[in-house]
Amino acid sequence: MKALLSAALAAASLLAAAPAAAEWRVREEAIMGTRVAVEAWHEDAAVADAAMAAVFAEMHRVDRLMSHYKPESELSQVNARAAAGPVAVAPELAALIARALEFSVLTDGAFDITYASVGYLYDYRAGQRPDDAQIAAHLPAVNWRHVIVDRAASTVRFTQDGVRIDLGGIAKGYAVDRGVAILAEKGIRHGTVTAGGDTRILGDRLGRPWVIGIRHPDDRQRVVSRIPLVDAALSTSGDYERYFDEDGQRYHHIINPRTGRSAGELRSVTIIGPDATTTDGLSTGVFVLGAERGLALIERLRDVDAVLVTAGGKVLYSSGLAPP
Ligand code: AMP
Ligand code: MG
């Protein structure tokens, strides 16, 4: 009895000495047209809260730089003026555009930020899409080779009129990577940062892996696969994110740069890899490539794996993932 009592007292004084209760902290906000969520753990919850606030500030900063909705963003300035001559941009934006062009090379043009030269003609909320003549007129402007980045001068220019770029296929992953870097800088060793379909995991879940569910394309409550992760990134691209259906045909936001139309072979692509910029770029690119060419690419790359859901509802895994 006495031993128990003194143990209880010792526990109580320990608690009193602790700066704030250690617990998981969770915060969500709508940024970049999507849901951004951050989770973090620290012995001192105040440290976790401060780190998370810094992450959200960073997300807003990246959004201001790279949004194509905001006319004052550097990205919008590039779209307005780069066909006339080099436009000065932040080194960070030049670097991300250069990275996007690398994904174009890697995916044989399936990932292409100039998709937007046609892509801007779609309005999924309004159920609007370009007709064949409009697509044919704008398609010549879709080609990543039209984009010239000068990293030394930190400028971007387009080789012809009509070119538009959009970083929607890679910027969320980049923002997530920035978020995780900030968590780590602020002393967090266990956490997650998510923006829409892009997640990066920092550390483990206090001795266990994080488990991320891949949703069923037609039912967000159903999970087609669960992936345990530690210190990794996971991105999912799906035809259910932004779309409208017309006459039994789905028009969605992932555009095949060769046709100017929605890529139709897959329902979703999930990529697992070391960082979220990579998994984000590859999830969009593999979605366009389709099952055969997409999986062949993933098998060629080190450090990445994939889970594909085909139009027929089959779930395909790259060889690095043991089927459940
Ligand atoms: P994600 O959810 O990462 O696959 O990103 C989809 C977004 O990427 C779309 O909403 C567009 O902003 C952009 N996008 C669409 N098609 C392409 C493409 N072929 N290459 C690069 N980005 C694209
Ligand atoms: Mg992507």
Image (spheres, rainbow, N blue to C red):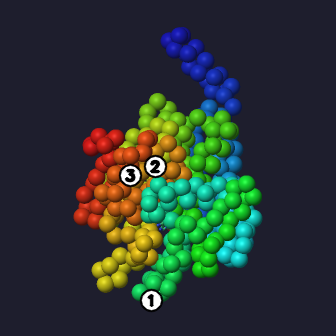
In the rendered image, which residue does mark 2 sit on?
234
- Please identify the quadrant where the C terminus is shown: top left
Circle nearer the N terminus (3, 1): 1
Circle nearer the N terminus (2, 3): 2
C-alpha separation, residue under disc 1 versus residue under disc 2: 38 Å
Determine the image quadrant of residue 254. Answer: bottom left
In the displayed structure, 96 sits above or below 302; it is below
Residue type marked 3: Leu
Q: Image check: 277 left or right of 85?
A: left
Classify mark 3: helix, strand or loop: helix
Q: Position of residue 255 (x, y in %)?
A: 44, 71
Pointer 3 local density, CA inside 10 Å: few below 14, some 14–19, many at least 20? some
User: Which residue is depicted at the point 58% across and 35% down?
Assistant: 189
User: Which residue is depicted at the point 59% across and 74% down?
Assistant: 164
Circle nearer the N terminus (1, 2): 1
In the rendered image, which residue does mark 1 sit on?
133
Classify mark 2: helix, strand or loop: strand
Labelled disc at residue 297: 3
